[in-house]
Image: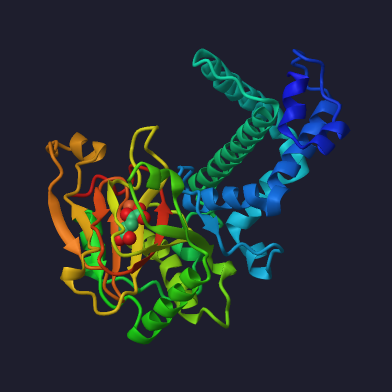
């Protein structure tokens, strides 16, 4: 372990406190581990706990893709009693306490050092060198990313093990037995059947008109308050031009956001209901994306997930709710759904490979409408909208395989 690496990966003040191993020495003595744990804690809590919020979003949504750069407008600083009951919250606290970080310190820092070495080598090859300040920033970012990914991995392993053990407190898995808030009868038979067979289902009046009206006004307020921001990277490549933020149930204002409160509660129940009725092995999620598409905005054709290592971000089902009153087709902004791509499990069962994607449906983002689709199988896009358009999305993670061979 190179001493310089660690020292540069943290703030100057912290560096002074840290006595790291000699350059080149790979041994992890107690003192080095102690100081490393301090650094990791500092990174988790830095800048109003940004890294911890990032970690939470990835755990809840089962994804670590770049799209998750949006500003989170809902994170509470101190845990509420509900948060303490929450399994994701408990797992994150468990895996980031000092004793857990002690175990993880070695692998994380060695991983980070390797990545940083590669970054530097690539830069040198291209004739670029970093100044001291940039180098420190890059190291910090690399350590942070490795820390988050490592903890997400540990949590996922824990979660699937408790599921395999058939535990009722099965980590983040949406076990219907564990759901006590409602009756798990929010989805129509046709919507579920559509999701299972052609890969998508649509349901009208998922929320009644009054509550949907509340949702619309609350979304307008979030937008008006400047809480939404563009996904810079994706805007730069011309892939999408909406503005987003991430909000979770605990982050809602009970007085001022009754519509979203009702909507989130109902959407959170979706994986529990689907697991009860179709064995998709979905995980629970409480991390919502709120998106606003200003006039002329769009989101080009894409998949929300995938099967191979590169594309598999954990997402299995996408759920989107719209609150836009009296939408007419001439206003554009449709969710264009392409025909389901036969996945590896269907191909194994003899399904035919599809050469080109074919348009299957253009869905107006009409108030009260819920759309569910298979994140790994359904290519989709948002057509250019002429009028401001809101969407509330929830991604339900789940393993590839179970329920995927249905046709
Ligand atoms: O807003 C929609 O209808 C779809 C948005 C979308 O595809 C996404 O956010 O991944
Ligand atoms: Fe999408």
Looking at the picture, tell me which residue is in the foreground, 127 or 145.
127
Image spot of residue 397 (x, y percent):
42, 50
Q: Quadrant of residue 131?
A: top right
Residue 198, visible in the rendered structure: no
Who is closer to the viewer here, 77 or 262?
Answer: 77
Residue drawn at x 82%, y 24% as measured from the top left = 20
In which quarter of the view is residue 110 placed? top right
Residue drawn where x is 70% and y is 42% of the image: 43
> Does 187 sit left or right of 199 as displayed?
right
Please give the name of the residue rendered at 45% of the width and 79% of the height, measured from the top-left corner.
259
Quadrant location of the N terminus in the rendered image: top right
Q: Is residue 283 visible?
A: yes
Count the numbered circles shown. 0
Image quadrant assignment for residue 325? bottom left
> Does 121 sit above or below residue 348?
above
x and y percent of residue 228 in the render? 48, 62
Q: Work out whether 94 lies above or below 355.
A: below
What is the image's colouring? rainbow
In depth, the one of 207 and 398 nearer the eye is 207
Q: Position of residue 175 (x, y in %)?
A: 46, 59
The spot of residue 301 in percent (x, y) is: 25, 47
């Amino acid at each position: 372990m190179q001493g310089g690496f660690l020292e540069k990966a943290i703030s100057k003040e912290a560096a002074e406190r840290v006595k790291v191993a000699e350059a080149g020495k790979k041994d992890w003595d107690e003192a080095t581990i102690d100081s490393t744990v301090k650094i990791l804690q500092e990174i988790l809590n830095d800048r109003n706990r940004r890294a911890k919020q990032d970690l939470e979003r990835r755990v809840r949504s089962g994804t670590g893709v770049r799209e998750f750069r949006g500003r989170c407008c809902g994170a509470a600083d101190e845990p509420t009693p509900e948060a303490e009951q929450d399994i994701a919250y408990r797992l994150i606290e468990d895996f980031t306490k000092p004793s857990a970080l002690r175990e993880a310190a070695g692998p994380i820092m060695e991983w980070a050092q390797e990545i940083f070495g590669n970054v530097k080598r690539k830069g040198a090859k291209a004739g670029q060198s970093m100044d001291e300040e940039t180098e420190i920033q890059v190291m910090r970012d690399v350590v942070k990313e490795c820390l988050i990914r490592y903890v997400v991995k540990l949590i996922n392993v824990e979660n699937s093990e408790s599921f395999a053990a058939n535990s009722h407190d099965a980590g983040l898995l949406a076990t219907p037995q564990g759901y006590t808030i409602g009756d798990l009868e929010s989805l129509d038979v046709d919507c579920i059947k559509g999701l299972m067979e052609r890969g998508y289902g649509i349901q009208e009046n998922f929320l009644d008109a009054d509550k949907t009206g509340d949702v619309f006004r609350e979304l307008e307020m979030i937008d008006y308050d400047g809480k939404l921001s563009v996904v810079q990277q994706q805007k730069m490549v011309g892939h999408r031009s909406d503005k987003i933020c991430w909000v979770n149930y605990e982050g809602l204002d009970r007085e001022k956001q009754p519509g979203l409160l009702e909507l989130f509660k109902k959407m959170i129940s979706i994986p529990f209901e689907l697991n009860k009725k179709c064995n998709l092995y979905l995980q629970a999620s409480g991390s919502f994306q709120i998106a606003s598409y200003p006039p002329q905005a769009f989101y080009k054709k894409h998949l929300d997930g995938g099967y191979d290592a590169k594309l598999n971000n954990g997402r299995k089902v996408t759920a989107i709710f719209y609150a836009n009153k009296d939408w007419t087709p001439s206003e554009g902004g449709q969710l264009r759904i392409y025909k389901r791509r036969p996945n590896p499990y269907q191909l194994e069962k003899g399904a035919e490979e599809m050469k080109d994607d074919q348009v299957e449906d253009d869905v107006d983002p009409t108030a009260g409408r819920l759309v569910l689709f298979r994140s790994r199988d359904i290519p989709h896009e948002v057509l250019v909208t002429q009028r401001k358009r809101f969407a509330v999305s929830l991604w339900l993670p789940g393993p590839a395989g179970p329920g995927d061979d249905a046709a």
